Amino acid sequence: MHYSVGVEYALHCLFHLVSLPVKKPIGIKELASFQGVSESYLSKIFTKLVKAGLIQSIPGVKGGYELARRPEQISFWDVVEAIEGKQPVFQCRNVIAKSVIHAGEMEDTSDHGESAAHCRINITMLQAEEQMKQFLKEKTLQWLKETLDQELAPEIQEKTKSWFLQRLG
Amino acid sequence: MHYSVGVEYALHCLFHLVSLPVKKPIGIKELASFQGVSESYLSKIFTKLVKAGLIQSIPGVKGGYELARRPEQISFWDVVEAIEGKQPVFQCRNVIAKSVIHAGEMEDTSDHGESAAHCRINITMLQAEEQMKQFLKEKTLQWLKETLDQELAPEIQEKTKSWFLQRLG
DNA sequence: TATATTAGAGATAGATGTTATCTATAATTT
DNA sequence: AAATTATAGATAACATCTATCTCTAATATA
């Protein structure tokens, strides 16, 4: 059980979108090349971010991506949800409803039937996930930028910026 | 991204181990039959619980499983870790190290290289998971038993107990 | 001691999800 | 009109999950 790498790529790319001192949109080409990933793969991830409303796409020449909201209003959780989907980590299969006790009682064969809402085990796991969710909601792109501005070696920050600025012309 | 159903089966079965008023070990046969799962599949899950030290197995006739520790000392997190393994939900692939800035600097090609420990994004995701973990550590089998004793319909509790007691002779 | 019962290990297989690439299409600046 | 860039679709390798079947090892009981 683990999050897909998409989350990681997305977070690193969003950091660049928020921290590069440029007004123009930034293209997949630059981001993919910087991180050593294929453009086709990274664009899939960016499509999800667009659909979730975190970034905007500008098509055509000189196109690319830019944030759709202010960096204080984009959280780590938004990114996780955009890439992984809204389904909870723990999905109750309703084993209670399948047990012999309830056998034949209900016709509902879906995995998210009524009794899942009343299953204490399910409730507990959802509450646990909620803890993680709340923590990640507090961590915004603005926070990430401020934190990394401080803790990233100035030399690295300089290198990164000049690499991108050169590419973006 | 989601936890495997194994976690759910395990939690439901452990609840029976802790709440049934019997001294004898309980067999896979009964548990699988009660939940409507195959014995072979459920025994895979139970093997993991044994290896994690949560339950003990008694082989042979009249054998089965029983708790290896007191129910106050078995938490939901123990179960998740036993089934899902100890790897964190968010596994840093070290995209920083792969970026052009660091290209060629290190020979370490593993996914868990040094710089992962210094990657703020990785640290943040691990902290988020820690929130979930702490919550689940507080929820023990003893707590589950006490909670369900109260909130489960007495009729269901009765049915369940008599179903098992009949099978166990 | 022989037999029945039960856990455990191994092989396997279908379904699903992840990671990744390639191609073709639509939009837009120059 | 041409070049550039995002978007959608098809596809494929690979891993993991879910699940079952078979065979082996251990043990209580007749």
Image (spheres, coloured by chain):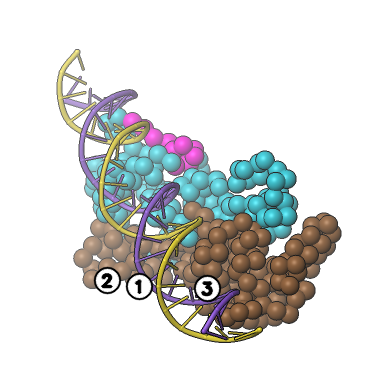
Chain colours: A brown, B cyan, C yellow, D purple
Q: Earlier in the sequence, mark 1 or mark 2?
A: 2
Residue A114 is labelled as 1
Q: Can the viewer see residue A9 in this picture?
A: yes
Residue that numbered label 3 is attached to:
A47
Q: Secondary structure at mark 2?
A: loop
Extent of the magenta region: B49-59
| Disc ID at residue A108 | 2
- Residue at 36% x, 62% y is A93
Q: Position of residue B141 (x, y in %)?
A: 49, 52
Q: Nearer the viewer, residue D18 or C26?
A: C26
Between discs 3 and 1, the one toward the N terminus: 3
Q: Quadrant of the rendered structure where residue C4 is?
A: top left
Question: Label 2 amino acid?
Answer: Asp
Q: Disc 1 on helix, strand or loop?
A: helix
Q: How many marks?
A: 3
- For the question of whether residue B136 can be seen, the reply is no
Q: Please tell me which residue is depicted at 82% across the width and 62% down the height of the picture.
A: A158
Marks 2/3: CA–CA distance: 35 Å
Q: Nearer the viewer, mark 3 or mark 1?
A: 3
The reply to whether discs 2 and 3 touch (Cβ–Cβ < 8 Å) is no
Q: Are marks 1 and 2 in contact (CB under 8 Å)?
A: yes
